[in-house]
Image (spheres, rainbow, N blue to C red):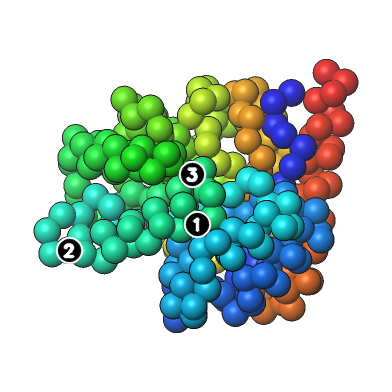
Amino acid sequence: MALTDALICSSHTVSGVMPGGPVPARHGFSERVRACADAGYTGMCLHFRDYRALRQEGHQDVDLRSVLQRHGMSDISLEFLVDWFLEGSAAAVAQADEATAFAAARAFGAQSLNVGSDFQGRGIPRHVLKSRFKALCARAAAQSLTIALEIVPWSDVRDVETALDVIDGCDNAGLVIDSWHVFRGHIPLGDVTAIPASRIVSIQINDAAATIEGPLQEDTLRRLPCGEGSFDLAAFLDALDAAGASVAPSVEIISPVQAALPLGDAVRRSFAGARRLLDEHLRKAAVR
């Protein structure tokens, strides 16, 4: 048994807004942290856009970290950096976001930063992507930060083999293994089991309907709480356990239904199914 008996709450699960909107969250930071702690979460995956907005509102780093510590949030990570592989004038936004993400990591005490590869089909050669990923990891190492690359089916890192190749040679790099991307991307669970344990930095759990609605880029915005959809999440956790993963799963539910809920309801809805899933997994693992 390797998975820890703890759960992390992802930023989108309790932001109260859909990704890509004009504001990173409609619920206050302290309120979100307190609600997550009250539900039973012991960590949070926070978004650097949220940190930027909080700083613009006048919040100080020491106060933000104090809120997390006061509520026992000990497992902190960050998301979600994109376009880090661009160069020249096209890289200006990504470079500013990276600087914000690093500042947020220092403020929150985050241990890792989730990143995505090319979602736009720009045709970046693999060797170029690898070189720029290595440079990103070098910059993150100076911040004592691990970079976690997410496997996404419509990106140029859509399977385990490619993901492991991109991060090869980077000591402070690993992968984000998201149940939605695994099942919607038709990644064999045997491939998940074969990932070296040290390379599994983040696990994200969620569920979805049996029928895909529209392109995957749209369907991913209609996720469900664990146990309310079609995914074999028990087998997913078994595969991660077999790989030796030793991180706490992060509950990431992105959907208009979730975003529209009052904060307390959103937190409880996300936690309940995930807690049942993890408890059942740990119970079975204990008697094997």
Residues at marks 1 and 2, CA–CA distance in whole angstroms? 28 Å
First in sequence: mark 1 or mark 3? 1
Q: Secondary structure at mark 3?
A: strand
| Res 90 label | 2
> Where residue 227 sits: x, y (%)?
77, 52
Q: What's the amino acid at mark 1?
A: Ala
Instruction: Determine the residue positioned at 49% across, 80% down.
Output: 57
| Relative to 61, residue 111 above or below | above
Q: Quadrant of the C terminus?
A: top right
Q: Secondary structure at mark 2?
A: helix
Q: Quadrant of the N terminus?
A: top right
Q: What's the amino acid at mark 2?
A: Ala
Which of the two marks, 2 or 3, is nearer to us in this view? 3
Is 98 situated left or right of 220 in this image? left
Label 3, residues with CA under 10 Å away: few <14, some 14-19, many ≥20 = many
Count of marks, rendered view: 3
